[in-house]
């Protein structure tokens, strides 16, 4: 997906870039967030959320509104589905992961800022792994933004995936060769979603080899044995109170045992 804007300071509706074969439903979108769903196998859905967060210098009220809206979207999702959260979060998560070991590694850049703390808390609450923090790529493949004077670089764009599907994510890195006409570099996630098949319990049917009955001696022995068992069963039935279910089960057992 791509974030489009009329100017560098104003974000408008995000635009999806997906293959024609992908069946995607854009569930909700606003000026900063777009949420889409793609139906997968085994009743598992792929949820894609594209965001453009306020900058670190934005007033607290606007930051609170953004994260409240984003949390509202995440609250609607099923935990069994695959969720990918991505976009420009203007969040520096730093190189340390103290307190966030379950959702990010130590392969980051710089120092965590306020936006980075908000973002890390959101991911921790919703069990989303920050992909750019778990792969030991080179620095040039980590920095997602570069200042106009080409001096300052930061890791402020992020791609996250459900912790449940962490092993499906094979790599997250910056693609510097892509011309995006922006001071942000293209961030790419390589993932291979593996879904387990639902195991169904099947009733096994016992098959009997009836070919032996073609032998006259075997057939005769079977008839005699069946006759004797039936006679015994008939004598026992006379002593019962007429329980049809019990008689049926005994008759069935007699045939199968014979």
Image (cartoon, rainbow, N blue to C red):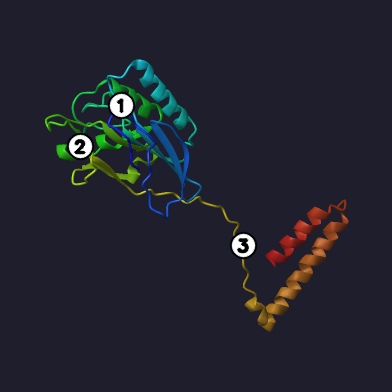
Q: Quadrant of the C terminus?
A: bottom right
In this picture, is 216 found above or below 93? below
Q: Residues within 10 Å of mark 1 (few under 14, many from 20)?
A: some
Q: 190 left or right of 243?
A: left
Foreground of the two, 61 or 211? 61
Where does the image place residue 157, in percent across and percent down from the top left?
27, 34
Q: Residue at x 71, y 76 (%)?
A: 221
Q: Quadrant of the N terminus?
A: top left
Residue assigned mark 3: 205
Q: Secondary structure at mark 1?
A: loop
Foreground of the two, 224 or 123? 123
Q: CA distance from mark 3 to mark 1?
A: 52 Å
Pointer 1 with pointer 2, Cβ within 8 A? no
In this picture, is 213 found above or below 250? below
- Quadrant assignment, res 256: bottom right
- Quadrant assignment, res 133: top left
Callout count: 3
Where does the image place residue 142, in percent across and percent down from the top left?
20, 37
Q: Secondary structure at mark 3?
A: loop
Give whichever of discs 3 and 1 has the lower sequence position: 1
Q: Residues within 10 Å of mark 3 (few under 14, many from 20)?
A: few
Residue extending farthest to the front is 6
Residue 142's tag is 2
Q: Residues within 10 Å of mark 2 (few under 14, many from 20)?
A: many
Q: 213 left or right of 60?
A: right
Q: CA distance from mark 2 to mark 3?
A: 58 Å
Residue 138 visible in this rendered orientation of the protein: no
Residue assigned mark 1: 100
Q: Residue at x 37, y 20 (%)?
A: 62
Residue extending farthest to the top is 60
Viewer-nearest of labels 2 and 3?
2
């Amino acid at each position: 997906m791509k974030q489009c804007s009329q100017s560098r300071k104003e974000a408008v509706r995000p635009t999806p870039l997906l293959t024609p074969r992908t069946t995607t439903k854009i569930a909700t979108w606003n000026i900063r967030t777009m949420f889409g769903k793609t139906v997968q196998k085994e009743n598992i859905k792929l949820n894609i959320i594209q965001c453009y967060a306020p900058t670190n210098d934005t007033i607290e009220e606007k930051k609170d509104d953004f994260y409240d809206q984003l949390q509202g979207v995440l609250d609607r999702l099923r935990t069994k589905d695959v969720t990918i959260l991505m976009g420009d979060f203007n969040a520096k998560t730093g190189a340390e992961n103290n307190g966030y070991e379950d959702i990010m590694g130590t392969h980051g850049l710089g120092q965590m800022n306020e936006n980075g703390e908000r973002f890390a808390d959101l991911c921790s609450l919703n069990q989303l792994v920050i992909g750019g923090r778990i792969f030991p790529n080179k620095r040039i493949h980590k920095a997602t933004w570069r200042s106009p004077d080409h001096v300052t670089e930061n890791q402020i764009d992020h791609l996250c995936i459900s912790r449940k599907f962490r092993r499906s994510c094979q790599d997250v890195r910056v693609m510097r060769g892509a011309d995006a006409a922006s001071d942000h570099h293209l961030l790419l996630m390589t993932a291979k979603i593996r879904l387990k098949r639902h195991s169904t319990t099947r009733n096994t049917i016992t098959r009997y080899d009836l070919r032996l009955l073609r032998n006259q001696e075997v057939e005769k022995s079977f008839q005699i044995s069946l006759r004797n068992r039936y006679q015994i069963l008939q004598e026992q039935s006379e002593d019962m109170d007429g329980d049809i279910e019990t008689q049926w089960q005994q008759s069935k057992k007699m045939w199968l045992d014979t």
